[in-house]
Image (cartoon, grey):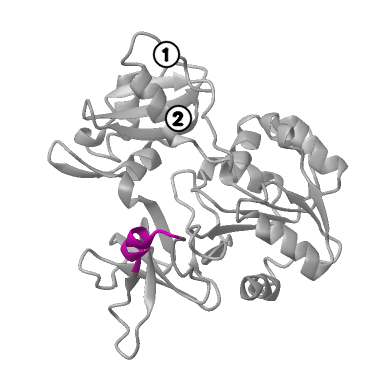
Amino acid sequence: MIDYIEWIISEDSLRPSVNDIIGNQSPFYFDNSVLDIYLMAFCGNTLVLLPEEKFLFPLELITFLRDSKITYIFWVPSVLHNVAKTKALDSAKPDLRKIIFAGEMITTKYLNYWIANYPNATFANLYGPTEITVDCTYYILQRNFNDEETIPIGKACRNTQILLLDSNLEQVQSHGIIGELFVRGSSLALGYYNDIDKTFEAFVDNPHQKHYQEKLYKTGDLGYYNEHGEIVLVGRKDFQIKHNGYRIELGEIEKALKNLPDVGDLCVLYDKETQTIVLFYESKKEITMLAMLAHCKDKIPKYAMPSKLFKIDSMPLNANGKIDRQKLLNWLNATKKDTYEYPR
């Protein structure tokens, strides 16, 4: 923990100034809150605890930030998405200097809305599974991205190394080749409390360390190196499915559908019972199958197209502010029965 905070403070792009006021979004049982709490303690900053109910109403949230003179935020992307979707910054604009996000993949078109409003602010994308001390990679935005591109997770933090390995646990060397992310370093957990089987499965011996025994954490996240040598995530290994004989990445489908006209957040799931790919999307309009096919015809093959579409008012979020995929799956299963309620 101390090493992580010292690393944050050593990075000019991430370190708060003595005058920064930090706006806390994450509950204290979520590891993202560590950054808020310990930066306050180490750097002498003021920390403002944001009322939980404000996150339900983006304009109220942004107004609260402005009135509280908050300048530094570390939030999950879903919160940034909601602000962008409602264009809340058009009505109220806090004086933000640093905007850091982590916890899930960010949608570039919504991030570009924030960048347009804060062209001189620092934007940083951090990545780290729960089994790591908060984060293990970071990317400081220094170039423009179009809405179709994916924001990289960048490079490893101090005292951490990311290995991109193929199915044979060999290191991926070429750009654009997908592998699984494995993490090594001082921030690694020792394992899962009272769960030897899960520990044995997730914390594996490093096959590339010949001189002494060392553990790697097997993240289950898939990614590749782009032409700049930056790691780009494509999704979860457990979001990889076999459908009609084809191996399909649900994350790649979501990426292809992100910029459908008039669509907000979306989520692609696989219904194992009916063997169908299902799209949940936020929109005020119904999206037809033809419109979806026309939008994606050059991005994903026909066999990867969702065959069921569900329009919902807003994506259900879990306690950490991320899209609650399990709630969507539960609702999908309920639709097969006599009565059901739409997810909220």
**Residue 211, picture quadrant:** bottom left
Residue 179 lies, with reference to residue 313, above or below; the image says below
Kind of residue sitting beneath label 2: Lys
Q: Position of residue 239 (x, y in %)?
A: 32, 44
- Note whether 33 is above or below 281 in the view shown: below
Element under label 2?
Answer: helix
Instruction: Decide whether residue 150 is among the magenta residues.
Output: no
193 to 269, vertically: above or below: below
Q: Which residue is mark 1?
A: 340
241 displayed left or right of 137: left
Please provide the residue range marked out in magenta. 194-203
255 shown above or below 150 = above
Secondary structure beneath dot 1 equals loop
**Who's the residue at 80% across and 44% down the image?**
94
Look at the image and tell me whether residue 90 can be seen.
no
Residue, x 36% and y 62% (percent of image)? Answer: 196
For the C terminus, the image quarter is top right
Image point (70%, 29%), residue name:
57
Q: Position of residue 129 (x, y in %)?
A: 48, 58
Chief secondary structure of the magenta portion:
helix
Mark 2 surroundings: few (<14), some (14-19) or many (≥20) residues within 10 A: some
Quadrant of the rendered image containing residue 60: top right
Q: Which residue is the site of mark 2?
A: 327
